[in-house]
Amino acid sequence: MAFRRDRTSQLVILRTLAIDHNFRGHAMVSKNSRVTINAIYDNVHLALWASLVSFLVYFATVVVPNIPAAQARFQRFQIQQIAAEHEFYCDKWGMGEHKQAHDRCILDLQAFRAKVEQRMSDNLQSDF
């Protein structure tokens, strides 16, 4: 069943929107109110643009210069993490430190990781 307004609700809406006969599709607003609303709109608009520009200046002067250092820190952390994983697995498989088998284990794990990373890289490149 479609929504249907009754006569009284239509009259209330018409009275609130247009009290005089010059209704042009929008509520009648005094000139002072319109000037105030436009001034508020312009100030908010200007403030938003100023915020965007100030953020871009901050990003360009503070964040962008620190990106290479952050990447280097991440790479160092990743290398340490991978080395700890290699040590964990070689120790788990009974190849303690300072043994020739331990060194071979580390080399085998590094080769295995390189093959897996290469396979993943190839798969990503073939998707694009």
Image (cartoon, helix red, strand yellow):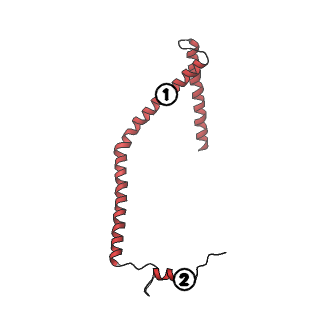
Query: Which residue was labeled with disc 2?
Result: 8
> Which label is found at residue 121?
none
- From the viewer's perspective, is residue 98 above or below residue 3? above
Disc nearest the viewer among 1 and 2: 2
**Mark positioned earlier in the residue sequence (1 or 2):** 2
Residue located at (53% from left, 12% from top): 98
Give the amino acid type for the residue marked by disc 2 in the picture.
Thr
Residue located at (39% from left, 35% from top): 69
The residue carrying pointer 2 sits among few (fewer than 14), some (14 to 19) or many (20 or more) residues within 10 Å by Cα, namely few
The alpha-carbon separation of the residues under discs 1 and 2 comes to 76 Å
Examine the image and state in which quarter residue 117 appears: top right
Q: Residue furthest top?
A: 99
Examine the image and state in which quarter residue 114 appears: top right
Q: In the picture provided, is 78 more to the left or to the right than 69?
A: right
Q: Residue furthest bottom?
A: 21
- From the viewer's perspective, is residue 19 above or below residue 118? below
The residue carrying pointer 1 sits among few (fewer than 14), some (14 to 19) or many (20 or more) residues within 10 Å by Cα, namely few
Q: In the picture provided, is 59 more to the left or to the right than 12?
A: left
Which quadrant does the C terminus fall into?
top right
Q: Secondary structure at mark 1?
A: helix
Is 40 in front, or is 120? Answer: 40
Which quadrant does the N terminus fall into?
bottom right
Give the amino acid type for the residue marked by disc 1 in the picture.
Ile
Query: Which residue was labeled with disc 1?
Result: 79
Q: Position of residue 102 (x, y in %)?
A: 57, 15
